[in-house]
Image: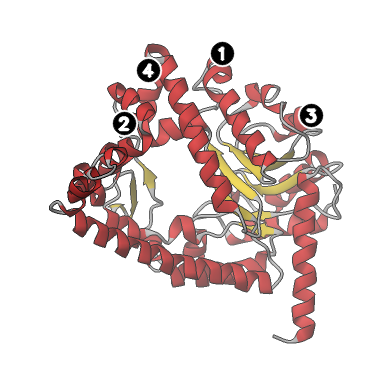
Amino acid sequence: MDQKLSTTAEMDFEVRKTRVEDAIALRPTDQTPFHLAWRFWPAFQAGITFEKAMYDPASMRAAAAKLIPELKPDHFQNPLPNIAIGNPLETMDFQALNWPGHGVDKNVSYQYIDQEFMFADEYDDYLFDPTGYFLHTYLPRVAGVFEPFKQLPDIPSLYYLRILMGSRGFTQPGVQEAFDKIATATEQVDDMLAEAIGLAEDMAGQGFPTLQAGTASAPFDLFTDYMRGSKGAMLDMFRQPDNLLAAIDKASRIMVRSVINSAAGRPGKLIFMPLHWGLDGFMSPEKFETFYWPQLRQVILELIEADLVPYVFWEGECGSRLETIADIPAGKAIYKFERTDLFRAKEILGDVVCIQGNVPGSMLNTSTPDEVDDYCRRLIQEVGKGGGFILDGAVGVPDEAKYENVLAMARAPAKYRE
């Protein structure tokens, strides 16, 4: 690369990175940062099927690499780790999703399947030995490749000479084949990560940072989405609340430890936390302040203490929660809102947390560039007043958004001042 171009790109990288960091810290910025989040939109724009994007990481990398310099985001979500994962999902016989070409049409986004992977009478097993429960019960249900793990020995029972006989469980029928398939799946993940890292490095070389260091969940969501299912968790709030609270506390501590360890040494600090069940229509304020917010707040505080930035995506409508969720350290996190009134959120949270959002997906799909531009102007000039705001689509960029509308959103920060 030409030295002058390299120096310019390095300067652009630092300007964009600093712009985002200043917004998080609630400091004024020279212009409102723009964040580019997406799923299959690069594939849609490149004319490749969503199925191909799932199974061909190089094609997804090429599609994203074309769009990022055109849209010039201040930071972007690397799409590959969430999209180009069809091969390992297939190899593992993953049961919690349908994805393009596997359960849904080749040009339809992947679909989460609400299921009960942990049963109502299994709390004691989980609380007594989470690792054993996962190896013998949970993992065999969530992915077919782990079915033989039911035969694995009770690991903590292997001591002294019991190690010799107990280890025979690792040679039971199907166990070695399972390990071979897991090795294949991890090689496929490594292939995807090579393309993802290549994309991040290429874009950094052109001045565009990606600042995410990992993902986490609200503890209640972790149990609801991935273990008990929505019906199971809802019933547990009433039928066995103490077990549910104990389990989400245990899961939370395991999750936070893992997130902090995996984020160590990564260049970014943002920990993306999409929230699903804390929205207005699911829980009463009493239930929210019992099962949801205290545990989520503790995760937020522990991530901040570890010098990470909780990047919390409040999906759905969360207007009734705004006063409650203001109880975090100022200038240390991002709250992205999907449907919540950003203008009201600014009034309540503007001195506490960086607000992100929320150009509606319907607008990016169906409106005109002028309408998108005008809405972005209002967000920048009103929500962005004084700093502490990042412009973004309410759900990122929808899969079938109009290019000219996304471009209008991307260009708005340079046109309007806070």
Between marks 3 and 4 in the image, the one whose residue lies nearer the viewer: 4
Between marks 2 and 4 in the image, the one whose residue lies nearer the viewer: 2
Q: Residue at x 26, y 39 (%)?
A: 154
Q: Earlier in the sequence, mark 2 or mark 4?
A: 2
Q: Which of marks 4 and 1 is nearer the N terminus?
A: 4
Alpha-carbon span between mark 2 and mark 4? 13 Å
How was this image coloured? secondary structure
Q: Earlier in the sequence, mark 2 or mark 3?
A: 2
**Tag 4, which secondary structure?**
helix
Image disc number at residue 235: 4
Q: In this view, does 96 lie above or below 186?
A: above
Residue placed farthest to the bottom in the image?
2
Image disc number at residue 347: 3
**Front-most of 102 and 122?**
122
Dot 4 amino acid type: Leu
Alpha-carbon span between mark 3 and mark 4? 36 Å
Alpha-carbon span between mark 2 and mark 1? 25 Å
The residue where tag 2 is placed is 118
Instruction: Name the side, left or right, on which 279 lies relative to 97.
Output: right
Between marks 2 and 3 in the image, the one whose residue lies nearer the viewer: 2
**Tag 1, which secondary structure?**
helix
Which quadrant would residue 385 be assigned to in this image?
top right
**Front-most of 163 and 240?**
163
Q: Which x, y percent locates residue 209? A: 68, 63
Dot 1 amino acid type: Glu
**Front-most of 411 and 40?**
40
| Crowd class of label 2 (few under 14; some 14 to 19; many from 20; radius 10 Å) | many
Between marks 2 and 1 in the image, the one whose residue lies nearer the viewer: 2
Between marks 1 and 3 in the image, the one whose residue lies nearer the viewer: 1
The residue where tag 1 is placed is 286
Dot 3 amino acid type: Glu
